[in-house]
Image: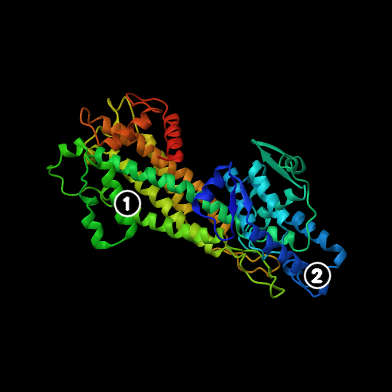
Amino acid sequence: MPHTIEPGRLDAELLQQAAQGGARFTLAATAHERMAASVRAVRELVSRHEAVYGINTGFGKLAQTRIADHELAQLQKNLVLSHSAGVGAPLAAPVVRLMLLLKAASLAHGVSGVRAEVVEALLALLAADVLPVIPEKGSVGASGDLAPLAHLAGVLIGIGEVSVDGQRIDAVQGLKRAGLAPFELGPKEGLALLNGTQCSTALALHALQRLERVFDAAVAVGAMTVDAAKGSDTPFDDRIHAVRGQRGQREVAARYRDWLHASPLRQSHLHCEKVQDPYCLRCQPQVMGACLDQMRHAGGILLTEANGVSDNPLVFADELQALSGGNFHAEPVAFAADNLALAIAEIGALSERRTAMLMDPVISGLPAFLIEHGGLNSGFMIAQVTAAALASENKSLAHPASVDSLPTSANQEDHVSMATYAARRLHNMLDNTAGIVAIEWLAASQALEFHRPLVSSPALEGLLAKLRERVSFLHEDRLMAPDIAAATALVEAGL
């Protein structure tokens, strides 16, 4: 059953379905009406022979150059060709799927001067999972994501390549697979397809979708480490968090209580002499709660952007006006991505510290490096080093991208957002943090089993069993990389 796109009505669930593939979307009838009105308005503006940016003028610094009526179609084609200047590896399939949906949803507002059949073609590509091959680099986040979106738009006119079932084929063949033929773009249509923040927004949204799974795993594994280190559950008492009042902190503390509930291992040391645990155990609600608050704030910004219109100029059919503005400037997306980078880095940094704590027998009370016959065996020694390397790399990647700007288009476009890089680098950071959490999961599971016959809570024993389906207890040294890869895949898949 296809989902009907009502402009401004996309939600997180629809975006998740689009990223995963297999979902079908159709345009609401009201969207058809508004798009038809905007197309008529563009035609009327063209007939008046007044200069309207991007319709009968050049682009960027060339905006003062008037284009003759008989060259308007060629103008739009040339725009797509000249702007298809991206480099680097192709964007991942979930990101391209989101780009197709977001661009269609933006154009469906009916203020972009684009025909409904062009928008429906984007949705047909999405439904058939015929995905434009879009190089990941080449956008500065204003005037929109020009190069990535040009590679997307190029497919509609039969230029470039698409990916189908992991195989790259030329755009014309791809269009046939989706039941389409190449388009000749009308006035304004090429510019509307290229202008906008859909690439940076799709990258950031997909990063947030991944981050939610990594976050959940980090909380669960962090609770396991508390029990494995015979830590206290007192720091998760709701009374502590209620008096501070931070929403995320209080909610995350409740999650830790749920994971640790009814642990016989906890009961076994209820009255031990330890007064306070290290911060990496005790302050988890404060750190992870702050991360959750940042994720929610960024998610709200990105959902608003996904539902908005960010091309230029915008055509208001009722007033028969084309207004030039700057909605293509992706500063909101850049800021949201930079805040997500902070959360991703901190989740990994705290997890690495918990793993390091488990390695130290003085603090953890466990065998050094979590291995029997230490010396002959090194156990988790270098796995922790790997976690440290990944956490350190994230610190460099967390530097805000939005504070950078280089002028483009002969200084006409003199301040840019760098939102596309801000969002793209989140995926490298997520790769790192998923690996860090996976290493902690391996270490915490190993540590728990040193406490046998005592067991942890039912929830945490279930988490241990899930890992043990893929990775066995480390009795003696073996290749660690396959274990880490298996645990990382489980973290990425979500708990």
Q: Nearer the viewer, residue 356 or 76?
A: 76
> Which residue is more in the foreground, 417 or 476?
417
Q: Front-most of 292 and 18?
A: 18
> Can residue 108 be seen here?
no
Mark 1 vs mark 2, CA separation in Å? 57 Å
* Residue 326 sits in quarter: bottom right
Specify the amino acid type for callout 1. Answer: Val
Q: In this view, does 307 lie above or below 254?
A: below
Q: Which residue matches tag 2?
A: 46
Query: Circle 1 is placed at which residue position?
Result: 252
Tell me the residue at 50%/57% (across/down): 337
Looking at the rendering, which quadrant does residue 289 occupy?
A: bottom left
Q: Identify residue type, mark 2.
A: Val
x and y, in percent, of residue 83 in the image: 72, 56
Mark 1 nearby-residue class (10 Å; few <14, some 14–19, many ≥20): many
The extreme front residue here reads 29
